[in-house]
Image (cartoon, rainbow, N blue to C red):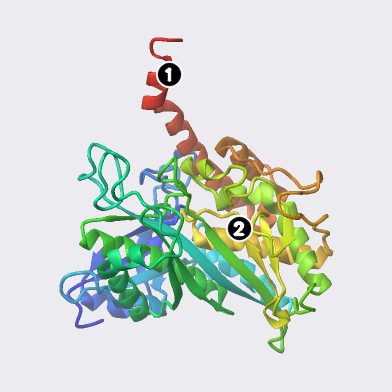
Amino acid sequence: MAQAEYIEAFIIDVNGVPRGKWLQPDKAKALLGTGIAMPRSAFLLDIWGRDVVEGGIALDTGDPDGLCTAVAHSITRMGWADGTACQAMLTMREADGGHFYLDPRGVLSRVLERFTAAGLTPALGVELEFYLVDQGQTGGLKIAPRGADYSGWRGWHIDAVGLGEIHDYQPILREMMSNAKSQGITLETLISENGPGQFEVTLKYSTDALRVADSATLFKRTIKQVARKHGLTATFMAKPYGQWAGSGMHVHMSVLDRNGNNIFAGTPERATPVLYNALGGIIKALPDTMLTLAPHANSYRRFAPGVHAPTFGDWGHDNRMAAMRVITADPQASRIEHRVAGADCNPYLAFASLLGSALNGIETKADPGPETFGERRSPSAPSLPIAWSAALEKFSDSAHIASIFGADFQRVFTACKRQEVNEMRRRISDVEYDAYLETA
């Protein structure tokens, strides 16, 4: 890092957005030692990068700094940048060495410490979807696939699980994979998905859940930068096109004991009871955790019946129509697939919700309720809040959320989302003018 032209050092805020600064190479030693100063309020900015006034950690406090140190494995060359620039993802600690309560990485770390205390280790794998879109040369449209025309025919084709679209975008995707590898991000698969210019990558299953969250976060940054280099935009919006498939983040989870054995492993037909206890905890908490899985206004456009984006807290064996898919065909790989989160979520917060709820379910021996077969679910399956404001209120009022995230994080994240909700209410869409300007 000492030979780098500069170091791009950044934290990840509550919305999952990197925020930071460029440093001279002589700051490298501080990044791995005493740390560098960053405003504590940088973790609590709304999606437009503005202070969250009701959060009370900027104007009310004099906006003090905290000390951030680098996550060691994140220190790598930025292969997409000109020259020899390096990156360093930062995490903030308090003076006593504890995690800063607003740092999403610290939030997840605290949940993982509960697993360690229980003699358990969660293992996670991630499937993450995104679109490559063209802004500007799109026949008057806001965004479109590369080479698409205004007719809605050329360039709008679907090539799900086909190789043609992968070949069409080969220079970008190969550079993306190369840059991921150089950062220690292991991408197991890449496929073309159910939308034009939509792709999905699978991040390797790992017993280091924090590293998986780091990888998902750094991968999102990587493909955005590579796409920009090629004149395109990589977007993880949950629903960039109203008429095409949304983008999700499916998370596969198992839990290991002190000897490295999967405690979910049963038979090919059914897992051990503890899997269903974990499932019960996740399902019970789903309505309260929804805001961490679908954090933005656009997130809720993804949820509708029959489109693989669940609207109920239900589960089923090998059932992709359910919110939670239980996979037991290979008993030693028995796991839960959480299918609710959008690709636009902050991975640290989504993982904290999933793992914290699962551990609560294991500890209380929670019951997941009756199984869903196809779309035939039990009337007892809880409906999910599929309106942004409803999810916000569930999160705000939840004792369960306070137990996972801490009351202070719950309060300020609520303040952040309320500020965004209120801003959106002040913005009038073209659809509303078309519908109501002359008719209402």
Dot 2 or dot 1, earlier in sequence = 2
Residue 226 screen position, x and y as percent: 27, 65
How packed is label 2: few (under 14 Cα within 10 Å), some, or many (20 or more)? many
Horizontally, residue 25 falls left or right of residue 289, namely left
Residue 91 screen position, x and y as percent: 44, 68
Asked which secondary structure carries label 2, the reply is loop
Name the residue at 59% across, 72% down.
Answer: 124
Task: Quickly name the residue at label 1.
Answer: 435
Horizontally, residue 295 falls left or right of residue 133, namely right
Task: Quickly name the residue at label 2.
Answer: 339
Asked which secondary structure carries label 1, the reply is helix
Residue 283 visible at all: yes
Residue 261 screen position, x and y as percent: 71, 85
Q: Tell me whether the residue at label 2 lies in contact with that at label 1, contact meaning CB atoms closer than 8 angstroms.
A: no
Residue 17 screen position, x and y as percent: 39, 56
Q: Quadrant of residue 358?
A: bottom right
Instruction: Tell me if residue 133 comes above or below residue 162 in the rendering.
Output: above
Q: Residue furthest bottom?
A: 259
Of 24 and 58, nearer the camera is 24
Instruction: Tell me if residue 53 comes above or below residue 1 in the rendering.
Output: above
> Between marks 2 and 1, how big is the CA–CA gap?
34 Å
Hey, what amino acid is under mark 2? Arg
Name the residue at 30% across, 44% down.
Answer: 143
Horizontally, residue 341 falls left or right of residue 276, namely left
Name the residue at 60% across, 40% down.
Answer: 386
Quadrant (top left, top right, bottom left, bottom right) of the N terminus: bottom left
Q: Quadrant of residue 350?
A: bottom right
